[in-house]
């Protein structure tokens, strides 16, 4: 199988989240390493051979992804916990061959900040959470269409007994 050592650029290091499976490939992300040190998206054959660096985060397009990728119709969707226009993280899509990277949303504090975890896909809508930002700065739950349109802030955690984890 594959060992992430961080020295074989652009291999990446610090794999977070789970692998997802499609066909004879696994897809995943590393939180650091890669060409720019900000993590990457990769594929590897199910037998551990055929590693391919699909995309390298460089800070401007996202940085430090955490969580799982979400797969639908030949596209991978995910989030980074930092980077992007405001350094608050991004939601992205990319084709499974590593082409057509699209930044669907730049978090800016008001619409959320520092997403951790994964997106849940229902129909053509991605749902997720941020750890900070939003109306009360304690994070929020959001929805966004898979084409990057229709962002909706569904719930803002308020830091009170019902809103902040213990």
Image (spheres, helix red, strand yellow):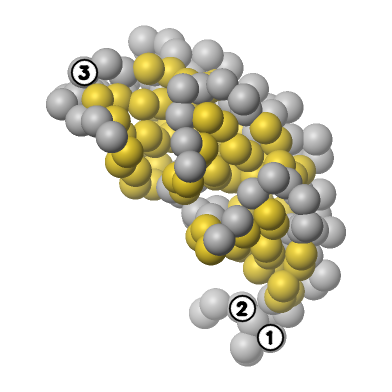
Q: Is residue 114 above or below residue 45?
A: below
- How much space separates mark 1 and mark 2, taking CA atoms? 6 Å
Q: Is 54 on the left or on the right of 93, as rendered?
A: left
Q: Are marks 1 and 3 in contact (CB under 8 Å)?
A: no
In percent of width and height, residue 42 lies at: 41, 26
Residue wearing tag 1: 160
Q: Could you tell me which secondary element the residue under label 1 belongs to?
A: loop
Q: Is 47 on the left or on the right of 16, as rendered?
A: left
Residue wearing tag 2: 164
| Neighbourhood count class around disc 1 (C-alpha, 10 Å): few under 14, some 14–19, many 20 upward | few
* Among the two numbered marks 3 and 2 on one chain, the one whose residue lies closer to the N terminus: 3
Residue in view at x 37 percent, y 34 percent? 27
Q: Of discs 3 and 2, which sits in the foreground?
A: 3
Residue 71: image tag: none
**Which quadrant of the rendered structure holds the N terminus?**
top left
In percent of width and height, residue 46 lies at: 20, 30
Give the camera-side residue of 43 and 82. Answer: 43
In percent of width and height, residue 101 lies at: 62, 28
User: In this figure, what is the number of numbered marks?
Assistant: 3
- How much space separates mark 3 and mark 2, taking CA atoms? 43 Å
Q: Of discs 1 and 3, which sits in the foreground?
A: 3
Residue in view at x 61 percent, y 33 percent? 63
- Quarter-wise, where is residue 58 in the image? top right
Residue wearing tag 3: 49
Q: Could you tell me which secondary element the residue under label 2 belongs to?
A: loop
């Amino acid at each position: 199988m594959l060992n992430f050592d961080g020295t074989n650029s652009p291999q990446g290091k610090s794999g977070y989240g789970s692998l997802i499976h499609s066909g004879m490939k696994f897809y995943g992300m590393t939180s650091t390493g890669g060409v720019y040190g900000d993590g990457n998206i990769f594929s590897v054959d199910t037998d551990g051979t055929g590693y391919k660096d699909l995309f390298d985060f460089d800070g401007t397009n996202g940085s430090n992804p955490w969580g799982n990728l979400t797969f639908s119709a030949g596209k991978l969707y995910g989030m980074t916990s930092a980077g992007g226009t405001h350094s608050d993280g991004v939601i992205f899509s990319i084709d499974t061959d590593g082409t057509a990277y699209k930044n669907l949303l730049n978090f800016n504090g008001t619409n959320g900040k520092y997403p951790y975890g994964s997106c849940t896909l229902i129909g053509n809508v991605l749902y997720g959470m941020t750890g900070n930002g939003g109306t009360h700065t304690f994070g929020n739950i959001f929805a966004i269409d898979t084409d990057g349109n229709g962002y909706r802030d569904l719930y803002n955690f308020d830091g009170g007994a019902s809103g902040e984890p213990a």
